[in-house]
Amino acid sequence: MGAGHGHRLHFHGHSVVHRAAPHHKILALLAFVLAVVATPAGWWPLFVVALGVLLGVVLTARVPLRFLLPRMVVEVPFLVFALVIPFVATGPRVDLGPVSLSEPGLVAAALLAVKGTLGVLASLTLAATTEPVDVLRGLERLRLPATLVQILGFMIRYLDVVTADLGRMRRGLVARGFDARNPRHWPVLARTVGALFVRSYERGERVHLAMVARGLPPGGSMTR
């Protein structure tokens, strides 16, 4: 699988975490995320312990935080949503200066931010210490349906291609003087996203037909 080595989410290394079996790491990630999600509000020391365990794994893997932190930008939409919750939630209010915020909303926002951050950091740690093709092998070892593994394989392989397409479309719009600054430009952005979706769908269909023509059976493995 060509997209495996040198993927932007993978940090090359030879630590014990890198050498661990992929299916063991996937199970560990699943257990960690379930434990974090199941931790109720008010059990804040457990979140500190979870963060300490996660940072211990990162240090053991010798993955620099400066490699992981910029990639956590994917969490920004969830943090923006968390910032809105205290303003729209109901229940007892607390005044912070001229601003009135919901107490249950503040707790919910804090929980969302903490759990989301731990989950994203744990997922990035797995991606940084495991080649994409090894993640697929681990999922196969865990008996995930082959069709789902194929879909994930295509997603990993062509995510960079779709991102490059989006970059070219954005540069084309800018070259024609388009500058999205207000809601009147949203229809243009919607048409751009629609065109990108159609283009990606057609590419995916062509790739699938080409792979089937070369002998890949429906549900066949992409890791061999």
Image: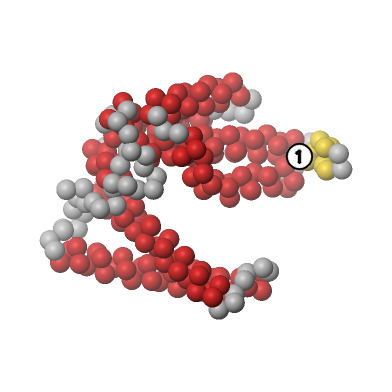
Residue closest to the eye, 10 or 211: 10
**Residue at image mark 1:** 102
Residue 91 in picture, x, y percent from top left: 76, 38
Residue situated furthest bottom in the rendering: 176
143, above or below 204, in the image: above
Check the image and tell me how it is coloured. Answer: secondary structure
39, above or below 125, in the image: above
Residue 28 in picture, x, y percent from top left: 37, 29
Please indicate, yes or no, whether residue 174 appears anywhere in the rendered image: yes
> At x 58% / y 47%, what residue is drawn?
76
Residue 43 in picture, x, y percent from top left: 60, 23
- Callout 1 crowding tier (Cα within 10 Å): few <14, some 14–19, many ≥20: some
Q: Secondary structure at mark 1?
A: strand
Location of residue 160 (image quadrant)? bottom left
> At x 66% / y 74%, what residue is drawn?
184
Residue 36 in picture, x, y percent from top left: 50, 30
218, above or below 190, in the image: above
> At x 32% / y 34%, what residue is drawn?
13
Residue closest to the eye, 221 or 88: 221
Location of residue 40 (image quadrant)? top right
Left or right: residue 178 versus residue 84 is: left
> At x 45% / y 23%, what residue is drawn?
56
Q: Three-letter amino acid code at disc 1?
A: Ser
